[in-house]
Amino acid sequence: MTQSTRSFADIRKALLAGAEVALVDVREEAPFAEAHPLFAANIPLSKLELEVLSRIPRRDTAITLYDNGEGLVQTALARLADLGYSDVKALQGGLQGWRDAGGELFIDVNVPSKAFGELVEHHRHTPSLAAEHVKQLLDSKADVVVLDARRFDEYQTMSIPTGVSVPGAELVLRARELAPDPQTRIIVNCAGRTRSIIGTQSLVNAGLPNPISALRNGTIGWLLAGQTLDHGQKRRFPAVSEQTLDLARIDARRVADKAGVKRGKRADLATWQAGTARTTYLFDVRTPEEYEAGHLPGARSTPGGQLVQETDHYASVRGARIALADDNGVRANMSASWLAQLGWEVFVLDDLRAQDFSEKGPWSAPTPTPWQVEEISADTLRHWQAHGNVAVLDFTTSANYVKQHIPGAWWTLRADLSSALRKIPDAEQYVLTCGSSKLARLAVPEVEALTGKPVFLLQDGTASWITAGFELENGETHLASPRIDRYRRPYEGTDAPREAMQAYLDWEFGLVEQLGRDGTHGFRVI
């Protein structure tokens, strides 16, 4: 009989050997963020089928699942077997087993990338300026530009006054255009620390002649200094000249080569994708708009700054091969330089032509063949609500539910379904929805089995209700499950308590020491 579990020692040995490791935490994001191993990937049981095929694409990958005694692993094992995964085992003793064996546990999310950022600053002494100093420079109209390295939507939520949105992978490509005078001081910020450290060090590594600094502790540091942020700004990077592009291309290639980035061609990609012994991820690191206008078939849109920030989310098999694509090499080479330092075998595809970017439109995750279920329209649901005993279950994210939902709908976590149904009054029939109906569709047979009543799917989800112009509710009106599907980052939004922001910074400062205790990271700072 084959062993049904893997131990802490098994996982550690595989990590140190550079073998492929898919260690999957099937809890929701909030409990995951409370404690998890360094290289654990969070793929919640609630949406396992919608995420796992892109995050663990090879069906014979050695996958190890764990929870913290909630009883989620057995269900996850069965679902992965149904999807054709052939080498799936449970972690011996679950999360507590890891702890008991002496395994280091980390809090928060995207920890490998955040810990690496702290290691970079530790080794390279990445220059930074305090918020008070930056405020003085801005107030005195000094020759300075502030470049915000986060996603554009994060920048719009809150930004440093005068800041321009230049997401991380764009910095080396765009900075010379925004600061053509080598005397102009460049300040890079994010919400906390990681993306400003990586962004600043990217410009330093690329050899830009300007004085370059991170805004120390990002927008958190700005708020802790008692200063005010802008909201709703729309300043974005401009196009670049051929001269700027040529310089950036040379700089990025040099940095990538120093980091040990490998070179690949289209023919290599075809060979890798046809192979079955190794996982290959294909990521397009350009902007989402460029990706949608045309990309390599099968490539996933991962703007480079976010790929470096959230590597565990996109590449959930540690030890896999990563191939990066863009149309001029700058963003691919700079992103690859960081992934190589993060311990990945990473290739930049060097011989791409315009005609290779033949697939258009947004990225769509591969999902299993959908259940055939009976669907009803928004009009029908509205009629049933007016005349019949019907319960509406909404499986969208809790944040989406609170923002707006069908009146009377109960917010429900799929992994918490049996408990949630005990809180929802019995009905003669049930209608399931989410934003698009993809997740709700998976829950239809589960609700049927638990209730013994007819269960229907709202066609096209809550989006169809909104399109019909029907009334909506907001707020936490009917929560059947606890709101644990998302961990609230202390640097999110504009209302985080000062204590939480300071505690987050203190945690980041301690990550280098934690990495040393863990001993499996394989990071290498150039």
Image (spheres, rainbow, N blue to C red):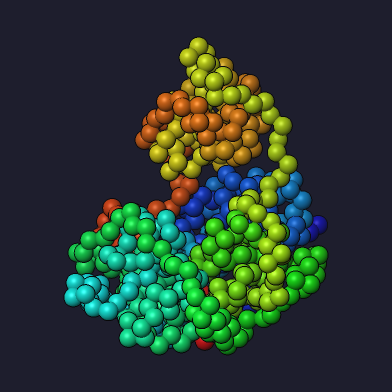
- Left/right placement of residue 461 relative to residue 233 reads right
Residue drawn 77% across and 65% down? 273
Q: Where is residue 320 in the image (x, y as percent from the top left)?
A: 67, 69
Front in this rendered view, residue 178 or 134: 178
Front in this rendered view, residue 284 or 507: 284
Q: In this view, does 480 lie above or below 16?
A: above
Q: In which quarter of the image is residue 15?
A: bottom right
Count numbered badges in the picture. Answer: 0
Residue drawn 36% across and 35% down? 475
Q: Position of residue 210 (x, y in %)?
A: 37, 85
Inspect this view and state whether residue 85 appears: yes
Q: Is residue 102 above or below residue 433?
A: below
- Left/right placement of residue 414 relative to residue 89 reads left
Q: Where is residue 224 in the image (x, y as percent from the top left)?
A: 24, 65
- Left/right placement of residue 418 relative to residue 114 reads right
The quadrant in which the N terminus is found is bottom right
Residue farthest to the front, as pictured: 242
Q: Quadrant of residue 434?
A: top right
Q: Quadrant of residue 222?
A: bottom left
Inspect this view and state whether residue 38 appears: no
Q: Where is residue 295 in the image (x, y as percent from the top left)?
A: 65, 61
